[in-house]
Image (cartoon, grey):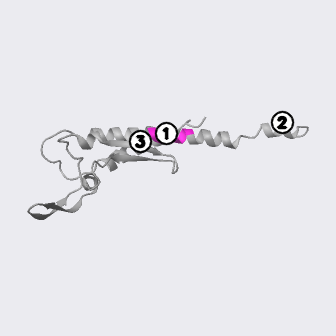
Amino acid sequence: MIGMTFKAAKQNFFDRERVKKSVDSATRKVLSRFGAFVRTRAKTSIRRRKGTSPPGQPPYSHVGLLRQFVFFAYDQPRQSVVIGPVLLREESDAPKLLEHGGDVVHRTRRGARRMHYRPRPFMGPAFEKEKAALPALWKDSVR
């Protein structure tokens, strides 16, 4: 550093804004790819079959709406990815009940009926299986 001017020394340091942009871009790309992989695994785990799936296994698809409406989105402010089924109706608890199970009261014209749903997770297992590949997606991602 002896005999070097301030301007020359300054050029040897990294540009913070450029590094931030590069890291933000890499984060968006990696998390978007991860979201796509989890979405694909979750969608393929929902198989078209008659009847109901065994508790603890992914649900069977009869109409195809659950499988069709699994999406992912990159959340810029939080720098994270959100992956899961979209609610078709606001009052629908179906995706949550399938994933975690629970009790719900169904109201009909004849009255109310309490129903118990056993969990048939499809998003959690897909996330756990794809999580192992995440470090490889980060490798050499920042340029």
Q: Kindly identify which residue carries mark 3.
A: 35
* 117 relative to 82 in the view: left or right: left
Relative vertical location of residue 95 with respect to residue 38 in this rendering, above or below: below
* 90 relative to 36 in the view: left or right: left
* 110 relative to 4 in the view: left or right: left
Picture coordinates of residue 83 (x, y %)? 38, 46
The earlier-in-sequence mark between 3 and 1 is 1
Q: Quadrant of the N terminus?
A: top right
Q: Quadrant of residue 8?
A: top right
Q: Disc 3, disc 1: CB below 8 Å?
A: no
Identified at 36% across, 44% down, the residue is: 129
Q: In the image, what residue type sits under mark 2? A: Ala
Q: Does the segment drawn in magenta span residue 53? A: no
Report the disc number at residue 30: 1
Look at the numbered disc 1 and give the secondary structure of its residue: helix
Look at the numbered disc 2 and give the secondary structure of its residue: helix
Marks 2 and 1, how far apart in space?
A: 35 Å
Picture coordinates of residue 86 (x, y %)? 32, 47
Q: Residue furthest right?
A: 3
Relative vertical location of residue 114 with respect to residue 46 in this rendering, above or below: below
Q: Which segment did they paint magenta?
A: 25-32
Q: Quadrant of the C terminus?
A: top right
Depth check: 114 or 102 in front? 114
Marks 3 and 2, how far apart in space?
A: 43 Å
Relative vertical location of residue 16 with respect to residue 92 in this rendering, above or below: above
Instruction: Look at the magenta stretch and give its main secondary structure.
Output: helix
Identified at 40% across, 38% down, the residue is: 36
Q: Kindly identify which residue carries mark 2.
A: 8
**Residue 51 in sight:** yes
The earlier-in-sequence mark between 3 and 2 is 2
